Image: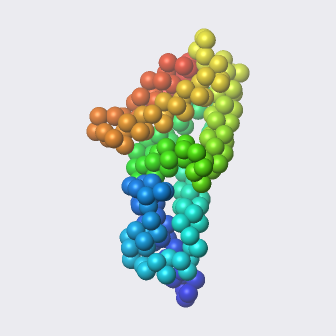
Amino acid sequence: MRGPYAKSTTVKRRILDAAAATFSEQGYRGGSTAAIASRAGLSQAQLSYHFANKAEVLAAVLDDRDRIADEITGQLPDDPRGIPAAVLRVAASNQSIPGLIRLYMVLFAEASGANHPLAEHYRRRYQRLEGEFLTAFESMQQAGLLRGGIDAVYAAASTLALWDGFQLQWLIDPVRVDVVSQLRRHLAAITWVTFA
């Protein structure tokens, strides 16, 4: 790829990376287009050439990060016995992208406020995640792989909640908190699956 299109793609990549870093540190409301442009080594006029406003930059960042996260997550396995190991693989891969995790956690907290432009995005994202986890744990339940007293609804909700909580603690203290080992203990407590 050469010429103006390649240059435009390179500039957009710089803007998205700068915006992701800025939003992860300052949130959506605190992160300004001036800060994003400066971090990307551009003027505000150059940034405006690619994105009309901050909301448009944020939408592009979220689309980009969702694509990256989906590539990492992949598909849950068809064999329900492989689901806990797949969850742990995703949790382990998340530890290599703390900036992305921080971005999601900061924006998620911000989006819980009234009239935030991200509220609908996060509501849809969580509905999708909850649906995927529920489907996975329903297949485990049907295969008799959930421990007594544990149903698919609880398994899905508790796993997502613990994961988010431990990821937040890990961002605060990455040396002390091991998300993968905590999730491993949780999954061992709610399933009959033996995994490494």
- The answer to which of 36 and 82 lies nearer the viewer is 36
Which image quarter holds the C terminus?
A: top left
Residue 162: image x %, image y %?
48, 30
Residue 101: image x %, image y %?
45, 48
- The answer to which of 105 and 166 lies nearer the viewer is 105
- The answer to which of 193 and 156 lies nearer the viewer is 156
Residue 114: image x %, image y %?
58, 45
Q: Residue furthest left?
A: 175
Tell me if residue 124 comes above or below residue 47 in the rendering. above
Say whether residue 161 is visible: yes
The answer to which quarter of the image holds residue 56 is bottom right
Tell me if residue 95 comes above or below residue 8 in the rendering. above
Which image quarter holds the N terminus?
A: bottom right
Q: Residue at x 38, y 73 (%)?
A: 38
- Tell me how the rendering is colored: rainbow
Q: Residue at x 55, y 80 (%)?
A: 49
Residue 83: image x %, image y %?
59, 32
Q: Residue furthest right?
A: 142
Q: Residue at x 63, y 43 (%)?
A: 123
Say whether residue 73 is visible: no
Q: Residue furthest front?
A: 114
The answer to which quarter of the image holds residue 193 is top right
Q: Residue at x 52, y 31 (%)?
A: 161
Q: On the rendered structure, is 191 left or right of 127?
A: left
